[in-house]
Amino acid sequence: MRFSDGVRPALTVNGQSPAPELRFQEGEEVEIAVTNKLDRMTALHWHGIILPYTQDGVPGISFPGIQPGETFTYRFTLNQSGTYWYHAHADFQEQEGIYGPLIIEPKKREPYRYDREYTVLLFDWQDEKPERTLANLKKQADYYNDQQPTLGDLFRDAKRDGWGAALKDRWDWGNMRMAKTDIADVSGFRFLVNGRDTEQNWTALFKPDERVRLRIINGSGMSYFDLRIPGLAMTVVQADGNDVQPVVVDQLRIAVAETYDVIVQPREDKAYTLFAESMDRRGYARATLAPRPGMQGEVPALREPRLLTMADMGMAHAGMDHGGMDHSDMAGMDHSQMAGMDHSQMAGMDHSAMAPAGNPDYAAGSGIAPEPVDGGRVLVYGDLKAMRPAAGYRAPDRTIELQLTGNMERYFWSFNGVKYSEAEPIRLKYGERVRFRFVNQTMMNHPMHLHGMWMQLDKGSGQFNPLKHVVNVAPGQTLEVDVPVDAMGEWAFHCHLIYHMGSGMFRKIVVEAADGSTQPFYSEQPAAKESEHAHH
């Protein structure tokens, strides 16, 4: 990788990092031959693409992986369109440079107009080897937290809140063996746009009054971004590759592995800054939209660092394993007795009206909810409504509850307190509709990614609930998605934070025929090492 301050070694695809943009047509039959010239096993995963499970690219689940010197040819038909991406799904190779955009152009005319388009691929590069990073986190979970509260902070808080409140706050956080500044597990990233750092300033050209489509992809391993373009409103037209009813916002938070397509219309003959601020406010990615090369817009200052609050602890305050708590007895809550419940009557309910004031995706009083700039509008999940009603929409047949759990001192992450290497697969029946209820018992965001099938995000819009391949579950919050089980095979289901996935927050889903019979799946064998999957 060539940055403004020198060259860094990286893993590449055809000599490039980011990997080359792949562009196809909906309906196209695709063949992609991948030759492994590394000294270790590799695999590529086509993120968000609906395909046969044997082509999904997850070692130990889809296939054995691609060994050094081998070539594997992926073959699948594209029955969708939109903005997606692809990345390595072996060890931590994605974090080392194997990630790239995947664009599928639709057969039919799109329901929105634009004059030109650009891909905006966000990434968090680190010079340190990912294996070293994970080892450091396992030795000390706050190893990278360089914003620990100081004595000066205590005096400031006491002046504002009184000594009693300030000392109680320190006592509460100390009892949990946590710091309110520990928003992101890892810091020190160099934030990139299309492989360029802030000084290199990737630039997209436009003519005033043109409508410009930006295909925004968060290909980061660990970083969330609050993205805005000062002076320009953004019309969101797609989420995770699926058309949504247009919604105009000034800022959006993009979780790891999500994609959003927005349209902007710069009317003035000047440069505008695309400013993607990391959620913890420790840095930013920056690009420029300009009428001519070489122009630069004003770069906003970073906002004050965020602090967790007790509201962000939510259920985590009671259920988070900060040291010794054992969650293993919670191993798999299947609420199938709810099978007869009729959820369809709730289709027209606006759940956002029931949400607490502030951002409904986060706890009331959260210290890390995205905050507007100058009164602007921030995108929330409730804003996303599908352009077309979902086919076959109906109430779920059963509900499976997954507790998102972790142990901060040992840095292990899990579902229901059971890490992947010790977990049984989640078994689903082809043709059923399953509701997954994610209950986040930690103080971290978790971007949950399901391979091979869509998740319909339950936000009270019924058959217009949006389809997503990644949903973010905020600290201490509960989120529900419905999954039409329409793909036989074995699939990965995991948190897309690379070090959470590599530390156990991963499950295998097995989709069986309705009569209980199974195909001779690649793997009904002992679980592979978590590190083999350690890429979403």
Image: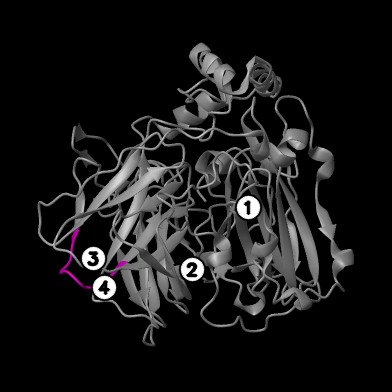
- 3 vs 1, front mark: 1
Residue 255 falls inside the magenta stretch: no
Q: Nearer the viewer, residue 417 or 151?
A: 151
> Of the residues under marks 4 and 2, which one precedes in the sequence?
2
Q: Residue at x 79, y 32 (%)?
A: 326
Q: Depth-wise, is mark 1 or mark 4 nearer the camera?
A: 1
Residue at mark 4: 211
Decide: marks 4, 2 in contact (CB < 8 A)?
Answer: no
CA–CA distance in space, label 3 to label 1: 32 Å
Amino acid at pointer 3? Pro
**Which SS type dominates the magenta stretch?**
loop
Magenta highlight range: 204-213
Q: Earlier in the sequence, mark 1 or mark 4?
A: 4
Query: Furthest-bottom residue in view?
Result: 108
The residue to which callout 2 is attached is 49
**Label 1, on which residue?**
357
